[in-house]
Image: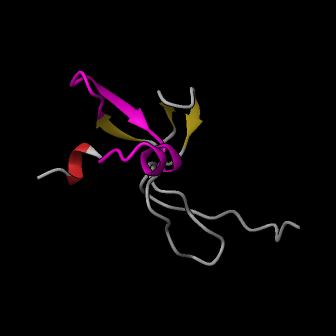
Amino acid sequence: MSTGRVPKTTDPLRKPTLDGTVAEPSAIAWCAWHEAYSNTARPVRDSSGARLFACLSCRQAYDLTPIADQP
């Protein structure tokens, strides 16, 4: 059901919500493991060292660590 209000934000990468808050930026990327688009995909390294995207469920299933979280 629509309230008729149009949320506004000055940052085009952030998605506005109807309650006036701004959600975290999100992006959609191709998960190389289950071969479909996902909004939870993050870059990881596979066994050969290549940088690919993996979604949250594939990272958990295959024990993959996002590149940003690696020491």
Q: Is residue 38 above or below residue 21?
A: above
Q: Residue at x 69, y 62 (%)?
A: 6
Q: Find out whether residue 3 is within the magenta segment.
A: no
Horizontally, residue 45 falls left or right of residue 33, namely: left
Q: Residue at x 37, y 47 (%)?
A: 63
Image quarter hosting the N terminus? bottom right
Query: In the current view of this chain or complex, which residue is farthest to the left?
Result: 71
Query: In the current view of this chain or complex, which residue is farthest to the bottom?
Result: 19
| Residue 45, percent from left and from top | 27, 33
Give the quadrant of residue 51.
top left
| Residue 67, percent from left and from top | 23, 43
Render colour scheme: secondary structure
Magenta segment boundaries in residue numbering: 45-65
Q: Is residue 15 above or below residue 35?
A: below
Horizontally, residue 55 falls left or right of residue 6, namely: left
Q: Is residue 35 above or below residue 29?
A: above
| Residue 20, percent from left and from top | 57, 76
Q: Is residue 8 above or below residue 59?
A: below
| Residue 46, percent from left and from top | 30, 29
Q: Residue at x 41, y 55 (%)?
A: 11
> How many numbered marks appear?
0
Query: In the current view of this chain or complex, which residue is farthest to the right?
Result: 1
Decide which of 29, 58 is in the foreground and name it: 58
Q: Residue at x 40, y 33 (%)?
A: 53
Give the quadrant of residue 4.
bottom right
Q: Find out whether residue 59 is within the magenta segment.
A: yes
